[in-house]
Image: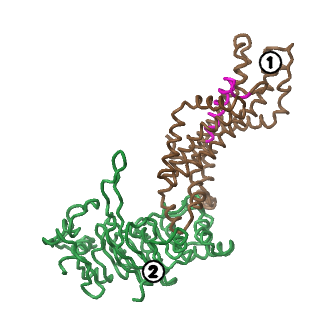
Chain colours: A green, B brown
Amino acid sequence: MNEPLLQVKGLKKYFPIMAGLFNKQIGQVKAVDDLSFSVYRGETLGIVGESGCGKSTTGRMLLRLIEPTEGSIVFENEEVTKLSPQQLRKVRRDMQMIFQDPFASLNPRHTVEKILEEPLIVHGIGSKEERRKKVREMLEVVGLSSYHAKRYPHQFSGGQRQRIGIARALMTKPKLIIADEPVSALDVSIQAQVLNLLEDLQKEFGLTYIFIAHDLGVVRHISDRVGVMYLGRMVELANSEDVYRNPKHPYTQALLEAVPIPDPEYKKEKQLLSGDLPSPSNPPAGCAFHTRCQACMDICKTTKPAWKEVEQGHYVACHLYT
Amino acid sequence: MAELARNEANIVQEEQATSLWKEGWIRFRKNKMALVGSGIVLFFILLAVFAPFIAPYDMNDQQLSMRLQAPSKEHIFGTDDFGRDIFSRVVYGARISLWVGFFSVLGSVVIGSLLGIIAGYYGRWIDAVISRIFDIMLAFPSILLAIGIVAVLGPSLKNALIAIAVINIPNFGRLIRSRVLSIKQEEYITAAKAIGMSDARILFHHILPNSMAPIIVQGTLAIATAIIEAAALGFLGLGAQPPNPEWGKMLADSKAYLTQAPWTMVFPGLAIMLTVLGFNLMGDGLRDALDPRMKS
C-alpha cells in the first residue's frame, strides 16, 4: 500500500438529546466514538456494522455533511475539519458521495442532464457545450444511453437511478468516493451489476472507495480492507480475506456466523448474537460489546479495550488479545 | 391481437420525457370540475380585459331619468339608483376584483415565501422570530386585521389591496416553511451539499421549485378569498371609493333598495359568487393534479 489519501483520527460525533420546556440537554447519543483509520490511494475500504452503529454518520462526517464533535480528518494533507465553507466546497470536488436511496437522492424536478451538469456548473468546469458533452459521455460510462439525458428520474428503474447517482458522483473526477450503502436498496440481481460497475470505474478512473454496507457478502466482494463497527467504535480492521477467514473479534465472528449459507443440509452450532443493540445514549461501560459477548471476561465490563495491531495490518480492540 | 400489440408499441413511443409539471397538466385536463372552474376564471379575465368593448354604457354614465330600472332590453341587468347600467358596472368591476385578487396574492406569495424559506432553511432563532410574528398575525381575525390596516393607511382600493396582501402573508409563510422543513431533509438536498453547492443555489434551484406546487394551489384558492375580502372591505366602505364599480361596494350602495330593486344586489352578488367559485374549482383541480397525495 502506498501513502494514505485520507486519515481519520479520534473522530467523534455526539448528538445531544434535548428535552423539557427549556430544551435542556439531558444526555447525548455517542453515534461515533473515537474512530481512527486511514484510507490508501486506490483501495476500497469497506465499513460494516449493524443499523445504528454509526457507519453512515461516519461517511457523512468525512464530507462534513454532519459536523464532527471532535477529531481530525486529513484529506490529501488538508485538515478538512478546519476548512471555511468556501474551501470546503472546493474539497468536495475531490470527495464525492453515492447515496443509499436512488429514489430520494435525485431531485424529481430536474432532468438527468441537469442533475449531472450541476456539479460542473457549481465548480465552474467547462463551457455549456463541453458540459453537455461530458454528461452524455458519463451516461455511457455508467451503462446508460445518451438519449436518457432529457428524461426525469421517475422514468428510470432503481438500478438505473443508482447509475445516475454514480454518474453524478463521477462528474467532477473525484479522488475519493464515499458509497453509503449504494446497493442495499436494489434488487439482488441489480446489486451485482452495480457492484461490477463500481469496480470497473475504480480501475478506469483510479478511484478510492469507502464502501459502507451492512451486507457482509457485498463488502467482501468489493473491499480490499474491511472495518467492523459496533456502537460507534471500530472493533476490527484488516485485509478483507483476514477478516473473513480469520476474524479475531467475537463480534466479527458472530456477524460472520449469522450469514446464511445456501445449503439446506448444512448444520452447524451457531453462536448467534442474542439481545438487542444497547442504547448508544447509554453505552455499556468498558467494552461496548460485553453485554452480548460469548467470551466476556471481568475486565471487559470495566476497561475499554485498546486498539491493537495483533498481526501485520490486522487491528482489533478486544481484551482477548492483550 | 396484432392491433393490441401495435397499440402497445404506440404507447411506448409516446412515453417521452415528461416532467412532473407535464404530468400534473395531464391530470388537470381530465378533471371536469377543474376545467369548468378554469373556464369561469378565463371568462372573467376576458371580461376584464375587453371591458370597454363589452360594456354597452360607460360605467359612470348617470341617467337620472332611468333610475332603478328593472332588467330590460336596453339594460339587461337593470340600472342602479343613479341610473347607471349595472351590466356595464359589473363588467368593469371584474377588472377591479381580479386586479385586487391577483396582486394582493402575488404580494403575499412573494413576501410570505421569502420569510418562510428563510425561517425553514436557517431555523434556530430566525425561525423562532419569524414564526412568532406569523402566530401573532394569525391570532387576529383576518378581516379585523385588514380593517385595522386600512384604518391606519386610509380607505382606498390600493390600501385595501395592501391590507389583504399583508393578512395573507402568514398563511403562505407557514406553508412554505413547512415545505422547506420537509424538503430540507430529502436526500437530494444532502446530495446537493455533497456536490459543493452554495446555500443560495440549493434554495433557488432545489428547494423552491419543489415547493411551487402547494404555492400555486394555495395561491389560486387565496385569490378567491382575497376577492371576498376586497368585497367585504368595499362593502364596509374601506376599499374602493365611489364611483369605482367594485362589486362589494355595489352591494353596499344598493342595500337600501333591496326590496324595490333586487337586481341592484343580485348581479354584483352573482358576479362575486361565480368568480370565487371559479377560482375554488380551479384551485381544487390544481391540488388534485399537482399533488395527488394531498387529496383527502
Q: Residue at the location (34% across, 49% down)? A: A19
Q: Is residue A131 left or right of residue B176?
A: right
Q: Which residue is mark 1?
A: B79
Image x and y of residue A5, in percent: 44, 82
Identify the image quadrant of residue A208: bottom left
Q: Which residue is mark 2?
A: A208
Magenta region includes residue B117: no
At mark 2, the secondary structure is strand
Vertical placement of residue B97 versus A161, above or below: above
The extreme left residue here reads: A298
Identify the image quadrant of residue B35: top right
Q: Is residue A28 left or right of residue B139?
A: left
Range of the magenta residues? B219-240
Confirm or deny contact between disc 1 and disc 2 (CB under 8 A).
Answer: no
Magenta region includes residue B228: yes
Vertical placement of residue B276 versus A98, above or below: above
Q: Is residue B169 left or right of residue A300?
A: right
Mark 1, chain letter?
Answer: B
Are the numbered discs 1 and 2 placed on the same chain, yes or no?
Answer: no
